[in-house]
Amino acid sequence: MSEKARKLFDALDLNGDGRLTRDEVITALLTKGPTLAAQGVLPFWGVGDAEASSALFDAADQNGDAELSFEEFAEVVNRKFGW
């Protein structure tokens, strides 16, 4: 898995529990997205609104448990962002 995916996952994991919820993804991308993009952790075009963030979450939640493991998250962002 890519180092960029790990950095982005850790930045979005607001409570540090090693899992991402839909609310964490939406909140973190809305509040931290521009800064993460400026730091090169996230492509600028990857910064979206709540709907886009929710769609990213849905695409990654392969087992439907309403949480993302790093592996689920990395598979989708590596493909989507071309990492």
Image (tube, helix red, strand yellow):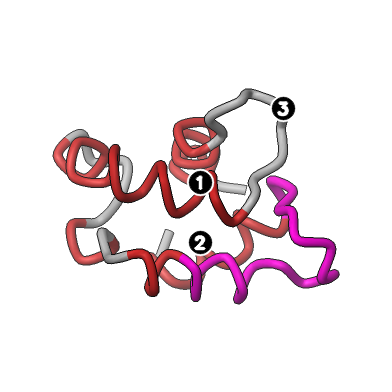
Identify the magenta region: 54-71
* Residue at image coords 64%, 68%: 60
Which callout, 3 or 2, points at the residue further toward the start of the chain?
3
Q: Is residue 41 left or right of residue 28?
A: left
Vertical side of 78 occupied by 71: above or below: above
Task: Assess whether mark 1 and mark 2 are in contact (beta carbons under 8 angstroms).
Answer: yes
Of residues 78 and 58, the one drawn nearer to the viewer in this rendering: 58
Vertical side of 38 occupied by 48: above or below: below
State the CA–CA distance, disc 3 to disc 2.
22 Å
Residue 17 numbered tag? 3
Q: Nearer the viewer, mark 3 or mark 2?
A: 3
Mark 2 highlights which residue?
A: 78
State the CA–CA distance, disc 2 to disc 1.
7 Å
Q: Residues within 10 Å of mark 2 (few under 14, many from 20)?
A: some
Q: Secondary structure at mark 3?
A: loop
Q: Amino acid at mark 2?
A: Asn
Q: Amino acid at mark 1?
A: Ala
Q: Amino acid at mark 3?
A: Asp
Q: Is residue 22 left or right of residue 51?
A: right
* Residue at image coords 38%, 72%: 52
Q: Quadrant of residue 63?
A: bottom right
